Amino acid sequence: MSGQEAYVGLGQYPGKYRKLALRSWARIVVIFLIVLSLGYLGITLFHPTSKVALVVDPRLESKFCDIPHPGRPLIQYVLMIDAGSTGSRIHVYKFNYCKDHAMLEDEIFQQIKPGLSAFDDDATGAAHSLDGLMEAAMKGVPESLRACTPIAVKATAGLRMLGAEKSDRILEAISTRLAIEYPFKLIPKNAVEIMDGKDEGIYAWITVNYLLGSLGRPEHKTAATFDLGGGSTQIVFEPKFEVRDPAKAGPQLAPGEHRYEMMYGGQNYTLYQHSYLGFGLNEARKKIKLMIAQEASDSGRLSVEHPCFPAGFREEVALNDKKSLVTIKGVMKDPLTPASQEACYKEVRKILNKDAPCTVQPCSFNGVYQPALDKTFAEDPFYIFSYFYDRTYPLGVRDEFQLADVKALMDKVCKHDVALFASKEQQEAFGKENHYCMDLSFQYALLRDGVGMADDRVVRSTRKIKDAETGWCLGASLAVLDQNRYCKRSN
């Protein structure tokens, strides 16, 4: 047996121990390198000055700063649900506290139809109808901030018209479902309620002027707001009165519920506000149709052709006695004469009740006191939105225009001729809606004859300012943050 074979027979061979040693050293080196790499990676990931950062949820960060104002959280979310007469909408607002006050950074908006009032006796169904909106909230708010994110549901005029018993049951069902099924924090006071029309108007005013950056400035060049909803409409502005005698106080805003005082940014504001319940677009439609039907019935007719509506329109309207029905039809004759174009406007303006007694002068309409716009608010911006925007924008009226342009559009649509619109989009929008003539006649009457706006007054109508929705929701959310603190200093 050779020496080599002897080694093999013993399970050994020349160089075996040397190879074993090399393998052991190789393993040690590999393990050492792995440990070293993991240690370096750990230091890199967790060191605050590292260039290789952890993946951070952008919903927890601000685009404008990394360190919040002392005592404030960097990010604060607010959920505001607008339960309107035709549908419900949620605004998921993201605020930062890079300064000592909340600054809007982002917004998620989603809407559903129908509104809560459509559920009538079905309170549970009304509460469940908001689940789709709450899904948007769950996706929009990071999990770590949900427990300190306030939520409120503010219903407007449509729900109020159901009556106290039905509306209270719906509100209670919503409050219970939100508290049990979702992790958000109901605000401490009036979390789910029918909002007072006064608050609706004031919050809309705050929203617009906050977005315009006009609040907190000593010159007080604030914008007026006129919000046309479905059930009601609200006007708010800061009137300016001449001081006729420097030694005495000049004319002032008359006392009453229309007077609203607030402070923002160290400035005091005295505002005029009024909410016209029943003069939202949908309620105005009902009033106008009932008036047309009643006039026909009083003259012994059970049907009437009316220039407010196009050919092919037909609707049965019940009179106040709930027994008699009158059929309203669109015009079947040539409506192109100026008299027929004006006929709808002349009919519509009757519902404003301009002849109502005015106990405190001057009055707008329906006997309501209002400082004259031409004397107390002649120059500053005037924003009209909601249904004002929805009815004018699709037909080509853009962000800034004169009231006379609304009159011209009213005259155009009341000819009931789709061919008068040049673009396909405008023709499609006009063809889908039988109420354009009546709606624009009401809007023009509301602005011109109602609140006393001059035809040459420049107005602005928009859905958004600086990418944020106009309306009352942002103003209400700012008030929520002003009244309480929710998330802690560190996120």
Image: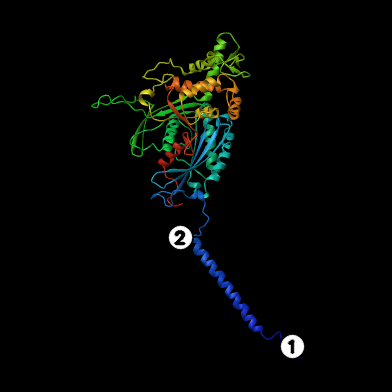
Q: Secondary structure at mark 1?
A: helix
Q: Pick whichever, 446 or 274, lies toward us.
A: 446
- Where residue 209 sits, quadrant-wise, is top left
Q: Pick whichever, 481 or 44, lies toward us.
A: 44
Residue 256 in the image: state x and y as whole percent.
36, 25
- Residue in the picture at 62% in, 79% down: 22
Q: Is residue 407 above or below residue 102?
A: above
Q: Pick whichever, 131 or 264, lies toward us.
A: 264
- Residue in the picture at 51% in, 61% down: 45
Q: Of the residues shown, which amino acid type is indicated by label 2?
A: Thr
C-alpha span from label 2 to label 1 = 64 Å
Callout 2 touching callout 1 (CB < 8 Å): no
- Where residue 327 sits, quadrant-wise, is top right
- Is residue 332 left or right of 378 when viewed as pictured? right
Colouring scheme, one of rainbow, by chain, secondary structure, one colour: rainbow
Residue 278 visible in the current orientation: no
- Where residue 25 sits, quadrant-wise, is bottom right
Q: Secondary structure at mark 2?
A: loop
Q: Is residue 42 above or below residue 268?
A: below
Say which residue label 2 marks. Answer: 49
Q: Is residue 23 above or below residue 365?
A: below
Label 1: few (<14), some (14–19) or many (≥20) C-alpha neighbours in 10 Å: few
Residue 120 in the image: state x and y as whole percent.
57, 29
Say which residue label 1 marks. Answer: 5
Residue 435 in the image: state x and y as whole percent.
57, 22
Q: Of the residues under marks 2 and 1, which one precedes in the sequence?
A: 1
Residue lying at the far left in this picture: please name it: 247
- Residue in the picture at 58% in, 72% down: 31
Q: Of the residues shown, which amino acid type is indicated by label 1?
A: Glu
